[in-house]
Each structure stands twice: as C-alpha cells, then as structure tokens.
Image: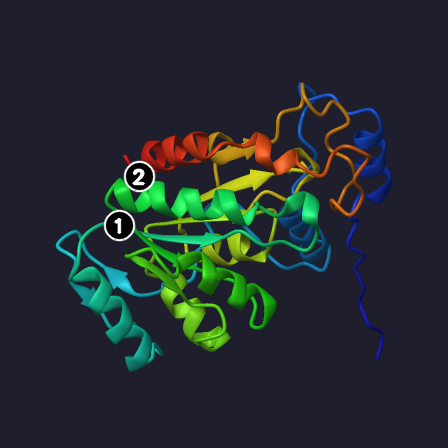
Amino acid sequence: MRLTTSTFDKGRAEKNKRVKAFDPAAPWLISTHERYAKGFRALGLKVDLENLSLHSGLGVHSDSTIEHGPGLSQEALTFIQSLKTQWGRLIGFAPFAAYPGKTYPLDLSEKLCQTLTEQGHQILLFGAPGYEAQQLSALAEHQSNVHVLAGKWTFAHELEIIGALDLMIAMDSGNGHLAANFGIPVVTLWGATHPSLGFMPFGQEKVRQLYADSQQYPELPTSVYGNKLPQGYSDIMRSISVAQIAAKVEEVLA
C-alpha cells in the first residue's frame, strides 16, 4: 500500500534571517499553527483555524456558578468552587520558561502577585515540580489569595483548573499555549524572543503581547527560541514592569 506523506515547513531559514536583521515593522511570519494546518491540508484534510472549536473546560458563569463539564474531576471542581465563592477574578501566572531570557524575575513576580491581589484578584501559580514549585511556594508564603498549584496537582488536574481561569499571564512558554487551547485570554511576556516569528498562543490578540525594551536592548530578539543572550542582556525581562503587566491585565479583563 502506498502511503501519502506531507512535510511540515517550520520556516527555520526565514526565522533565523528575521532574527539577524529584525525589523519590528515587517509583516509577521506565518504562525506555527498555520504551518501545521497547511501540512494536514496537503493530505486532503480540512483544517479551518478561523472556525475552530476550542476545548471547553469548566463552565463558569457570570454569577460564579460552575458546571461540571464532561470528564472533569470532582477534585478540580471543588477547588475552583472554593475560590469562586471568595472574591476576585482567577488569574493564572506562570513566570518560568525554558531559558533565563524568557523567565520573569522572582522578586518582580512577587510584586506582581501583590499588585494583582490588591486590585481584587486571586492568583494561581503554575510551574514544574521541584525547583520551580519550591520557588513559587516561597514567593506565595506571605501573600493571601495567592495559590501554588505547582507540585501539588497532577497535570490533568492543572489543565482542568486552567479551563476555569479568567486570564493567564505567561512567558513564551507552554502554559500560555495550554490556556489558549481553552479560549482563555493570555497576556504573554516576551524577552529574548518575539511573537512575529510565529509562536504567539493560538487565537490571541497582538495587543496582549508585552515586550522587553528594544531601545535598551537593541539586539532583541536574540534568537528564535531565546536560548542565546548577548553580554549585558541578563536583565531584559526586568524592562517589562509590574505596573505595565497589571495595567494590561485590567485592560484585557475589562
């Protein structure tokens, strides 16, 4: 039997070229989602990204009541209900990423959590078990209405909880993409990388993207995946201020 094959064009050459001579005014490259869709279309499959039905998580209504959606665990439902009976919107925050040039500093993360809780929100911290979970626990130790999920819930349960968020704050990392799969608004912080290369979370708006200061750090983006940092660029994420993020959160939630 002859197999029909298709190749996904990841555009590595054009991405590298864009980084070496970056022009913020240039048209954005095709998204990774569309690149994969084109590969599937070449096999004769119908892929319509404009009318895609996203995964539905917990059904949270305007009056804070919650529907137990199909396949959702009682554990996650009970946890979300306990938060929804309190005050404020539920905001996910995932400050870590694969590389330092894409990770939000912990001291600023702590200040951001404090600012957002003072604005009337509850914060759910996401990260990996081990080091990240320990750092997030220390960050949240003396803050009320800041809840650490890292290392305490299974990945499946975390996905259920993400589906009940009002908003996610993420780096150029997987957590933003997971939230986008549920149709959750995502505010993404970009340090060493840039969404114009095609990695913006699915279905999000350009106005939800916050960038490190390119005037202070003119070599941004430093690489396609953020794994390279020129000398003197270790603090690029600090150029995205807590006030800037908090204001964007309020803008999106409004």
**Place of residue 173 in the rendered image (x, y in percent of width and height, measured from the top left):** 60, 52
Q: Quadrant of residue 77?
A: bottom left
**Residue type at the position of mark 2:** Leu
Nearer to the camera, 90 or 60? 90
Q: Decide which of tag 1 and tag 2 comes sooner along the chain.
A: 1
Nearer to the camera, 145 or 138? 138
| Residues tagged 1 and 2 counted as in contact (Cβ below 8 A) | yes
- Judging by the rendered image, the residue that carries numbered circle 1 is 89
Say left or right for 222 vs 212.
Answer: right
Q: Is residue 240 above or below residue 34?
A: above
Looking at the image, which residue is at 27% across and 48% down?
121
Q: Residue furthest front?
A: 142
Q: Is residue 241 above or below residue 3?
A: above
Secondary structure beneath disc 2? helix
Looking at the image, which residue is at 67% across and 41% down?
198
- Judging by the rendered image, the residue that carries numbered circle 2 is 253
**Place of residue 196 in the rendered image (x, y in percent of width and height, measured from the top left):** 66, 33
**Place of residue 119 in the rendered image (x, y in percent of width and height, measured from the top left):** 26, 40
